[in-house]
Amino acid sequence: MNPKLQLSQFDYELPPELIAQSPAAERAGSRLLHIDTTGALHDRRFIDLPGLLKPRDLLVFNDTRVIKARLRGHKESGGKIEILVERITEPNIALAHLKASKSPRAGSVLMIAEAFSVKVLGRQGELFELEFPERVLDLLDRHGATPLPPYIEHAAGRDDDERYQTVYAREPGAVAAPTAGLHFDTAMLARLAALGVQQAFVTLHVGAGTFQPVRVENLSEHIMHTERYSVSEQTLEQVHATRAAGGRVIAVGTTSVRALESAARHAPGAGPAEGDTSLFITPGYRFSNVDALITNFHLPQSTLLMLVSALAGMEPIRRAYAHAIQSRYRFFSYGDAMFIETPKS
């Protein structure tokens, strides 16, 4: 990492009214800001995306599924608590963030949704280890709520249960959506396939750490959050075949980038690449498996803004964000999209 990179280099002023509080009426109805290989900006619609892709290109999607990870309840003393499940480690055990007036001790029991109780087994850093009476996923499905990002001001409803989920989600485990994928509907996927654009999938379970602010000015001192990922042998073969044939590997979302780049050192034919990744991508990083990116707009001073700046260049991203604000694009999870092509060398 460049030791001179500073947090303040990734700041910008965003009018609060540009933070999207709800999705576009149709998934593919959002706007699309296109940064081409020269750094030029083009205002488009997401429905225009097929015209920007080529038959030899490979789109790589993150197929993680958002779980209803938010639970509310109370301690034995009656004090209110809020739980956000971060990771399921065994069928009936999970690591979770816990909000309470006073942190519960190991061995204490928490009543959830007036329906069941969980036992606090202990702590792992900032997370609490909780034992559930049944499979965690089953209880979350029945009693949990979709964990919308902190900048969305309304409580999750039925519309959010559907729209804060990609149409291709299949592997449960995320507590935040891979939001670039929210723009794709089944008609768009079919249209791209008919044009010869290939499709592949990775899994990266997005954690709540994706919303955690960077708290150090010198980025070399930042400790990146960890997320679980898996890239199948088939996807790795598709990536290598695409690049060998002169096509582009286009990641759908920064989470797909993290998974693909975390798998970059994995030898072909050695089986799937999987594990925990704490990869921190900043300007100066040399990409191995990604040639272009479809993404949403990211928070100021966020690690995700640093990642897209690494791919497109810091100055092109500054110009793109200034243009998006001036042109009243909608920002963050339910907002508009960008298509970033890597600059010509």
Image (cartoon, grey):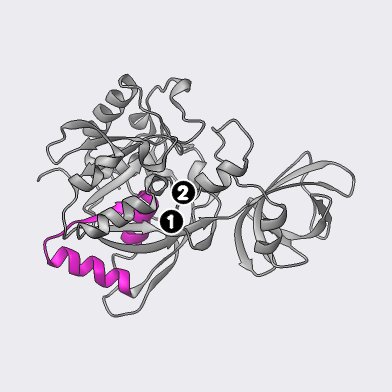
Residue drawn at the location 57% of the way across and 47% of the way down? 161
Q: Nearer the viewer, residue 79 or 126?
A: 79
**Are there few (<14), some (14-19), or many (20+) residues within 10 Å of tag 1?**
few
- Looking at the picture, how far across and down is residue 16, in whole percent? 48, 22
Q: Are marks 2 and 1 in contact (CB under 8 Å)?
A: yes
Q: Nearer the viewer, residue 282 or 208?
A: 208
Using residue 138 as the reference point, say whether residue 178 is left or right of it: left
SS for callout 1: loop
Q: Which residue is mark 2?
A: 223
Q: Nearer the viewer, residue 67 or 260?
A: 67
Check disc 1 and give the amino acid type.
Ser
- Looking at the picture, how far across and down is residue 42, in whole percent? 20, 31
Disc 2 versus disc 1: distance between alpha carbons?
A: 8 Å
Using residue 328 as the reference point, say whether residue 319 is left or right of it: left
SS for callout 2: loop
Q: Which residue is mark 1?
A: 278
Q: How many marks?
A: 2
- Looking at the picture, how far across and down is residue 36, in whole percent? 16, 39
198 over 23 or under it: above or below: below
32 in the magenta segment: no
Segment colored magenta: 234-262
